[in-house]
Every structure is written in structure tokens, then in C-alpha cells.
């Protein structure tokens, strides 16, 4: 399992609209092969910042399968217009003690 962590800053004053369209976008991404779940957190100190924790079966399910699909186009069309800059996206492996 892979964690995709996306830190997204949105245009000031657009939080409510972003959150509404993000709910629609969640139903889009959930159709992608290898998608497991998504958690969204809204930053307390910076009201324009959101963290998306998206879990995938494999890195390629996100970076190849999803990003090269029509679902990604739909996802970006819903939430991309709210971005204030480029999201910071990184991937993490789970460590097992």
C-alpha cells in the first residue's frame, strides 16, 4: 500500500466551493483501479491549505493508471480551478516495525 500526500493551497475565499466540489471529486477518484481511500484535512493555521491523504494499492496505480485516465481529467476539472499554485505531492511507503 502507498500513501499519496498532497498539500494543496486554494484561492482565498473559495473554501466552501472547493469543499463542495471535492466531495464530487471523491466519487470520481474512488472509481480508479487501486484506489483504497481518501482522507482530507483542513489546516487550522492556514485556512487556504488542505492535506489529502490518498491510499493506493501501488505507486503505479496513482502515477500511471489514474494520472493517465479520463478519471484524472474529471478530478482535475472539479478541483483544479481552486488551486493557488501547484500542489505538493509526495508518495510514502509504510514501514513495518
Image (cartoon, grey):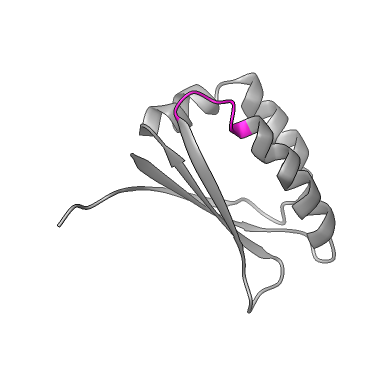
Q: Is residue 60 left or right of residue 9?
A: left
**Residue 21 appears at what percent x and percent y?**
78, 45
Which of 55/82 is in front?
55
Which of 25/89 is in front?
25
Q: Residue at left 78%, top 52%? A: 18
Q: Residue at left 72%, top 56%? A: 84
In the depicted structure, whether residue 7 falls above or below residue 58 = below
Which range of residues does the magenta coloring cover?
29-34
Tag count: 0
Q: Which residue lies furthest to the bottom in this view?
A: 45
Q: Which residue lies furthest to the left in this view?
A: 97
Q: Quadrant of the N terminus?
A: top left
Q: Residue at left 84%, top 53%? A: 17
Q: In which quarter of the view is residue 71 placed?
A: top right
Q: Is residue 74 left or right of residue 29?
A: right
Q: In this view, does 11 lie to the left or right of 54?
A: right
Q: Does the magenta stretch include residue 11?
A: no
Which of 86/2 is in front?
2
**Residue 55 appears at what percent x and percent y?**
44, 42
* Magenta region, main secondary structure: loop
Q: In which quarter of the view is residue 29 placed?
A: top right
Amino acid at each position: 500500500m502507498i500513501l499519496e500526500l498532497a498539500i494543496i493551497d486554494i484561492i482565498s475565499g473559495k473554501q466552501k466551493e472547493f469543499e463542495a466540489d471535492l466531495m464530487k471529486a471523491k466519487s470520481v477518484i474512488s472509481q480508479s483501479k487501486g484506489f483504497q481511500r481518501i482522507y482530507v484535512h483542513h489546516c487550522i493555521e492556514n485556512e487556504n491549505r488542505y492535506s489529502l491523504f490518498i491510499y493506493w494499492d501501488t505507486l503505479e496505480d496513482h502515477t500511471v493508471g489514474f494520472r493517465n485516465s479520463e478519471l484524472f481529467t474529471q478530478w482535475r476539472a472539479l478541483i483544479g480551478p481552486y488551486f493557488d499554485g501547484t500542489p505538493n505531492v509526495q508518495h510514502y511507503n509504510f514501514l513495518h516495525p
